[in-house]
Amino acid sequence: MPYVLMIISAVLVNNIVLTQFLGICPFLGVSKRFSTALGMGGGVIFVMTLSTIITYLIQTYLLVPFKIEFMQTIIYILVIAALVQMVEIMLKKVSPALYQALGVYLPLITTNCTILGVAILVIRKEFNLMESTVFAISNSIGFTFALIIFSGIRERLELLEIPEAMKGIPLALVLAGLLSLAFMGFSGIVH
Amino acid sequence: MNQWQNLIKGLIKENPVFVLILGTCPTLAVTTSVANALGMGLSTTFVLVTSNLAISALKDFIPDKVRIPCFIVVIASFVTIVDLVMAGYCQVIHAQLGIFIPLIVVNCIVLGRAEAFAAKNGLWSSTVDGLGMGLGFTFALLVLSAIREALGSGSFLGHKFIHSDGILFFILAPGAFIVFGYVIAIINRMNRGTK
């Protein structure tokens, strides 16, 4: 698949949050403000790209040669948890400014299912290293894109008068549904 | 608190999906049909019970500082067991659930119970807590999937009760969000009434 098509498909058509239901927890949790959404999105782009490349290399050079593919889930989650911790420590030393911006969101990323999800998906789809990297980047951009749009809408809804029972999560979910409906309009672009 | 209360608190009062809003990803993704929801619910229940049991048994040996990675390894081992057993014995459901089986590892309910309950309580009450939470999760999935399957394809567990196609919207992604949102709103409304 050409890379441009892959990017469009992952960002707009098969958006990882709105059509594949991965990463709903951070999508609902950190979308109350635009600035936090931006921070979380940046963190996810960074960690997802790195973790997908590393887990891909582990899969090809460690798990497959030793025929221990069944250890995939355990190894991947450990790698991701360790990686997030490492990124946090390194970022603190190397770029305090970036750490200030992303620091709070990094620990949350370990349990973000988009990270583990994409790492497993690239193996199931049998991508090569380049395709996996592009897939990870475009999916994390798709996540950030959806998160930013969603937080923009939620900020505006804050002062709205709505029934007590709909406040908070229910309204956010209905809103996500409408956003997902809007994204379905893109499905004609890529077959 | 006796064991009976411990068991049923997960079903309604502290329902992980409807009240605590945990584990939303699998909830939205697998509720397209009742059969899928049942498969997901029961496999998560198994992981919850076994991981709670194991973590409760190991809690005195796990150093406090590295407890989260240890919990994740324990959970991931049980998820791998479920994954392999399902791949061997119920391939249809396994194929339908796809990537969401390995993703039970990052289901916040499992890690949440390990951290909040199993790491502090005894073997027996941790097991009961895991079972209660798992059944609560299964119950929530069944409610959502029953609504979505009935409206979306006019059937229950694959048995059709109307002679035409359902409203496709409810099977697709937007339907999942909207049904879930309204069900939580109804539960909020009911809870407010009882207070």
Image: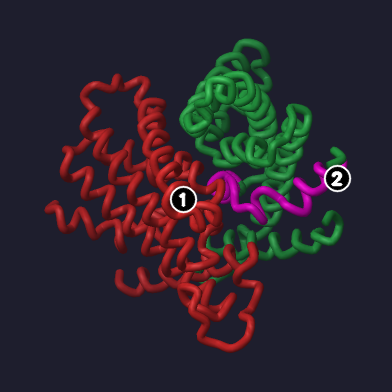
In the picture, residue A121 is in which quadrant?
Answer: top right
Q: Is residue B137 above or below residue A137?
A: below
- Whether residue A156 sits left or right of residue B14 in the image: it is right
Rendering coords of residue A132 (x, y %): 72, 33
Number of other residues with Cα within 10 Å of mark 2, as a class: few under 14, some 14 to 19, many 20 or more: few
Q: Which residue range is magenta in the image?
A: A4-30
- Please tell me which residue is depicted at 34% across the width and 51% down the height of the picture: B45
- Whether residue B35 sits left or right of residue A60 in the image: it is left
Q: Which chain is indicated by disc 2?
A: A
Helix, strand or loop at disc 1?
A: loop
Rendering coords of residue B5 (x, y %): 18, 57
Q: Is residue B117 above or below residue B176?
A: above
Check disc 1 and give the amino acid type.
Gly
Number of other residues with Cα within 10 Å of mark 1, as a class: few under 14, some 14 to 19, many 20 or more: many
Q: Would you name the residue on which mark 2 appears?
A: A5
Q: Would you name the residue on which mark 1 appears?
A: B23
Check disc 2 and give the amino acid type.
Leu
Q: Which chain is indicated by disc 1?
A: B
- Whether residue A130 sits left or right of residue B34 in the image: it is right
Q: Give the CA distance from mark 1 to mark 2.
A: 32 Å
Which part of the image, by quadrant, shows the N terminus of chain A? top right
User: Going by the picture, which residue comes out furthest to the top?
Assistant: A93
**What chain is colored red?**
B
